[in-house]
Image (cartoon, rainbow, N blue to C red):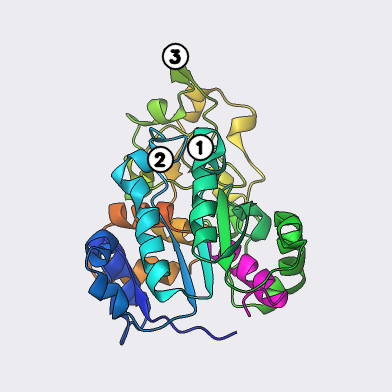
C-alpha cells in the first residue's frame, strides 16, 4: 500500500530539522504546534483530505516515570487536539501510540475515555500493547497502539489483534521488507567511537551504583537487549535506567562480560561508554545516517538522544501496519 505524507506536526524545532533533513517534505503542510494550529478551526478545514492519521500524544503525563496527571495536565489534553482534527477531516484510519501505562492510568478510566471519544466520532477501535524486542530490534519497549477505523471490523478483530499474531506475520516477511533488523545490541554497537562517549572515572561509580537511601535498583551494564530508550538519556542516569557497555564486551562480541565476575568497584576501573546517537537511532529502527545527517545540519547530540528516546520504534509500527493491511482492516 503506497503512502504519501501530506503534513506533519512537531513542536520541537530540532526534531523538525531532523525530519526535514532526512525526508523530502516539499508540499507537506507544516502544522507546528498542534495546540496553536487547532485553535483556529479554519486551519483544520484547509488541510488537504487524507485517509490516515498516525501519531502519538505526549506520554509523560501517563507514564510511571512522570506524575501521571493524565488529562489534568496540558500535555494530556493533546489527545483532544487530535480529535479536533478527526472531527473535521474524519480520515478513515487512525493509529495512535502511547506508553503501556495508558491502559491502567486512573484505574482504566483514561483509556475508556479515549475509546469513547473515538467511538463518538464514528470509529471502530482495537488496541494492544506491543514490545519492540518482538520485532527484531533489541530494545525492551512496551507501547500501546490504538487502531481506529471507519470501516467495519470482523467480530474477532480485537481478539486477533495481538502482539503474537502481529509478530508471527512479521517474522514470515521481515527479511524481505525495507526495515533494519538486529538480533542483539552487538549487531549494532560500533567497536570504535569517539572518546567523548566514554564515562569519566568520576561518574562511573554513580552510574554503576545500585542506589542509595530509599531508591534501590540493580544497575547492570552490558544488556544484550537494551533497556527502553528515554528522552532524557543524555543526562546519564544510573545503569538501571540507561544503557552502558564495557569495551571488552563490545570487542569480544559478548564473549567476555566483566559483569559476571567483577564487583562494581572493579567495573569502575574498566572502559565503559554510553551508546552513541547513531546507535540509539538504530535501536529504534532508523538508519544511522538519520543521526549523521541531522548532526551535519546542526542538531546536537543531546537533541538527537532526546529524539531517539521520544520516537516510536519503526519495526513495531511497520509490523502492525503490515498486519492491518494484510487483513484488509484499512479498506
Which callout, 3 or 2, points to the residue nearer the camera?
A: 2
Secondary structure of residue under mark 3: loop
Q: Residue 80 carries which label?
A: none
Q: Which of 39 and 252 is in front in this view?
A: 39
Q: Main secondary structure of the magenta part?
A: helix
Where in the figure is residue 113, as x and y percent of width and height?
A: 50, 47
Residue at position x 51%, y 60% in the image:
120
Numbered marks: total: 3
Q: Name the residue under label 1.
A: 105
Secondary structure of residue under mark 1: helix
Range shown magenta: 313-331
Dot 2: few (<14), some (14–19), or many (≥20) neighbours within 10 Å?
Answer: many
In which quadrant is the N terminus drawn?
Answer: bottom right
Q: Do the residues labelled 2 and 1 touch (CB within 8 Å)?
A: yes
Dot 3: few (<14), some (14–19), or many (≥20) neighbours within 10 Å?
Answer: few
Residue 4 sits above or below residue 280 on the image = below
Q: Does the magenta stretch include residue 252?
A: no
Q: Mark 3 points at which residue?
A: 214
Residue at position x 32%, y 29% in the image:
202
Q: Residue 70 carries which label?
A: 2
Q: Do the residues labelled 1 and 3 touch (CB within 8 Å)?
A: no
Q: Quadrant of residue 201?
A: top left
Q: Label 3, label 2: how many angstroms apart (C-alpha)?
A: 26 Å
Tell which circle, 1 or 3, labels the residue nearer the N-terminal end: 1
Secondary structure of residue under mark 2: helix
Residue at position x 42%, y 47% in the image:
59
Amino acid at each position: 500500500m503506497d503512502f504519501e505524507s501530506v503534513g506533519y506536526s512537531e513542536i520541537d524545532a530540532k526534531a523538525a530539522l531532523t525530519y526535514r533533513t532526512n525526508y523530502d517534505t516539499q508540499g507537506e503542510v507544516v502544522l507546528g504546534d498542534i495546540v496553536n494550529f487547532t485553535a483556529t478551526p479554519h486551519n483544520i478545514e484547509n488541510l488537504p483530505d487524507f485517509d490516515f492519521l498516525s501519531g502519538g500524544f505526549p506520554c509523560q503525563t501517563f507514564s510511571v516515570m512522570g506524575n501521571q496527571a493524565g488529562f489534568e495536565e496540558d500535555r494530556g489534553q493533546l489527545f483532544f487536539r487530535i480529535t479536533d482534527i478527526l472531527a473535521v477531516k474524519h480520515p478513515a484510519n487512525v493509529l495512535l501510540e502511547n506508553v503501556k501505562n495508558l491502559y491502567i492510568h486512573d484505574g482504566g478510566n483514561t483509556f475508556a475515555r479515549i475509546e469513547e471519544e473515538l467511538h463518538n466520532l464514528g470509529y471502530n477501535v482495537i488496541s494492544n500493547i506491543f514490545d519492540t524486542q518482538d520485532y527484531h530490534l533489541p530494545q525492551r519497549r512496551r507501547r500501546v497502539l490504538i487502531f481506529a477505523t471507519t470501516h467495519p471490523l470482523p467480530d474477532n478483530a480485537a481478539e486477533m489483534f495481538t502482539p503474537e499474531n502481529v509478530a508471527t506475520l512479521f517474522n514470515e516477511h521481515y527479511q524481505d521488507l525495507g526495515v533494519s533488523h538486529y538480533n542483539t545490541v552487538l549487531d549494532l554497537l560500533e567497536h570504535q567511537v569517539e572518546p567523548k562517549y566514554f564515562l569519566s572515572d568520576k561518574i562511573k561509580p554513580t552510574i554503576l551504583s545500585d542506589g542509595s537511601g530509599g531508591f534501590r535498583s540493580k544497575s547492570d551494564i552490558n544488556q544484550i537487549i537494551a533497556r527502553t530508550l528515554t528522552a532524557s538519556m543524555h543526562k546519564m542516569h544510573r545503569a538501571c535506567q540507561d544503557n552502558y557497555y564495557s569495551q571488552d564486551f563490545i570487542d569480544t562480541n559478548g564473549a567476555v562480560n566483566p559483569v559476571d565476575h567483577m564487583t562494581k568497584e572493579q567495573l569502575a576501573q574498566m572502559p565503559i561508554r554510553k551508546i552513541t546517537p547513531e546507535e540509539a537511532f538504530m535501536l529504534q529502527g532508523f538508519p544511522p545516517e538519520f543521526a549523521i545527517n541531522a548532526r551535519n545540519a546542526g542538531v546536537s547530540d543531546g537533541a538527537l538522544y532526546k529524539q531517539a528516546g521520544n520516537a516510536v520504534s519503526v519495526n513495531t509500527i511497520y509490523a502492525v501496519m503490515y498486519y492491518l493491511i494484510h487483513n484488509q482492516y484499512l479498506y
